[in-house]
Image: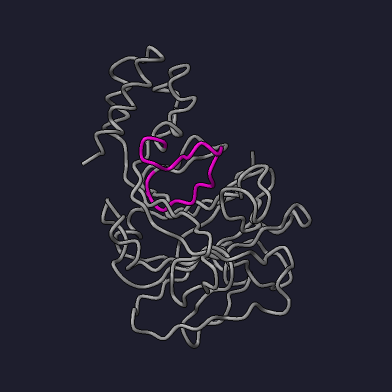
Amino acid sequence: MIDKHVVDVIHAVGTETDAPQEIMAAVVQRALPSIRLIAQFPSDGQTLRVGGCRIGGLPDLPEGVKWPRLSAALKSEPTGLQCEDEPLWFLMQVDLSEVASADGANLLPKSGMLYFFFHWHEAERPEVPDAGLVLFCNDSKQRLHRTEAPADLHSAGHFQGFELAPRLEWTVPCCDDTNYQLGFWDNLNSRVAEVQGLEDGWGPAPVHRMLGFGEYLQAPGIAEGYQLLLQVDSDSPGGISGVGPYPETGMLWGDCGRIYYIISETDLKAQYFGNVWAVLEDQ
């Protein structure tokens, strides 16, 4: 059941902006639970756990699984490109047993590991598409090991690694042409996050999120029958590495953009992650 404080703040914002009652009711009805993944500053002497939830750093892959390359991500895209088969960039790994308690929609497997990789051309090679790949290891007893980065991994694809702490977070839908109300949507996301203790007054926090509604920068949302699997944000705007209030991974997607991994509801229900695709949206 949706958090009462979230319901209250939706109605408060609606009252402040003179939004019709039907809009407020529709937002409450459509609100979805998600899993916010919050990067943690390490304690003195702390090392990254093998197999833990992590953003950046190096992946802990099962024995026998190699670091994926661009050809694997493009296998389902008939591009016809003859491009260098370079390594993908490692973004995140998620221990599904760690996030299970925050999966309010009960959509993810209860054990196993998900690994998220991405290729970004950074406008240097516009003929090569952005491409994402998700690996799923469903054997929770399989031995994992810290995998070294390939020697030919692009220098821009190395990121600082941090542990991630999962939190249940209620999310609200985006504005669309059918429910537009001037002012109501301006800061609704931040007010909803704030009432759940996910904004601390330092400014915009990076929003890394599984499930629920994505915070899209360009698209109004995603097609019916599809679901956000993961949103990977840029570092906080204006942040200084190691100094600001949030851990800085070095991830900056264009002008503070975001990467979204999208999965069909059918595949998610079947726990099949082989057809996930990723898209980068810039500011």
Rendered location of residue 2, percent (x, y):
25, 39
207 on left or right of 166: right
Rendered location of residue 169, percent (x, y):
35, 45
Residue, x 54% and y 47% (percent of image)?
206
Residue, x 41% and y 65% (percent of image)?
273
Residue 17: name its quadrant: top left
Tell which of 15 and 257 is nearer to you. 15
Most distant residue in the left direction: 1
Is the magenta region chiefly helix, strand or loop? loop
Q: Is residue 83 above or below residue 277?
A: below
Q: Quadrant of the C terminus?
A: top right
Assess whether residue 201 is covered by the magenta stretch: yes
Tell which of 69 and 95 is nearer to you. 95
Rendered location of residue 59, percent (x, y):
53, 74
Residue 26: name its quadrant: top left
Residue, x 54% and y 55% (percent of image)?
278
Q: Is residue 58 above or below residue 205?
A: below
- How many labels sit on residues? 0
Residue 22: name its quadrant: top left
Assess whether residue 244 is covered by the magenta stretch: no
Most distant residue in the top direction: 18
Q: Is residue 34 above or below residue 7?
A: below
Residue, x 47% and y 71% (percent of image)?
135
Q: Is residue 105 above or below residue 60?
A: above
91 on left or right of 14: right
Most distant residue in the right direction: 124
Instruction: Magenta stretch: give its range.
Output: 194-212
Tell which of 210 and 131 is nearer to you. 210
